[in-house]
Amino acid sequence: MKTSVLDIFIARFYPQTKDKINDLIADSILLKKLTDAAYTKLESSIQYYADISEQIKYVILILNDWANKNYTDINEKKIILGILVLLYFVSPIDLIPDFIPFLGKKDDLFLLKKVSKGLDEEILKYKEWRKTNK
């Protein structure tokens, strides 16, 4: 598999994250815990995350179907990107702490929107797959 800039960046600056992603890819139970945590957080703050809630829900569905080997027509880079999106979403560590008025949660939305843009094409492909397979 060809190494991307994202892979190099994560391996260099966030080696624990790379290990965690590899663990999540290898263990469907850990991945299920991550998707459950993301879904719980999304449901508890649905109004705040309204702009990205559909994308997050589809990332959860894609990862669950991939882990269950139902949806296999996906590039591993997209799986890694989906896991990164959910890890950031459920993580209590933020670029700007949430307790800072106005800006605290804005960084979450901004970053999640930007990163999840890379999954838009995959989400459309998954929706089509779902229509014919569910």
Image (tube, grey):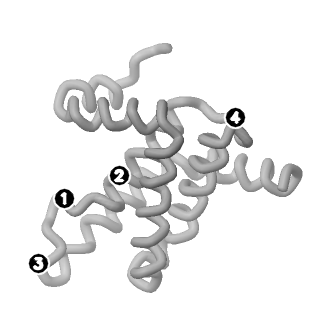
Q: Residue at x 19, y 25 (%)?
A: 12
Q: Residue furthest front?
A: 29
Crowd rating for badge 3 (residues with CA inside 10 Å; few <14, some 14–19, many 20+): few
Q: Label 1: which residue?
A: 93
User: The disc labelled 3 sits on which kind of residue?
Assistant: Ile
First in residue order: circle 1 vs circle 4: 4
Q: CA distance from mark 2 to mark 1?
A: 10 Å
Mark 1 is on which residue type?
Answer: Ile
Please tell me whether mark 4 sits on a helix, a strand or a loop: loop
Q: Are marks 4 and 3 in contact (CB under 8 Å)?
A: no
**Residue 87 badge:** 2
How many residues crowd mark 1 within 10 Å: few (<14), some (14–19), many (20+)? few
* Residue type at tag 2: Leu
Residue found at x 29% / y 23%:
8
Q: Which residue is mark 3?
A: 100
Mark closest to the chain's N terminus, 1 or 3: 1
Q: Amino acid at mark 4?
A: Thr
In the rendered image, the quadrant that contains the C terminus is: bottom right
Q: CA distance from mark 4 to mark 3?
A: 41 Å
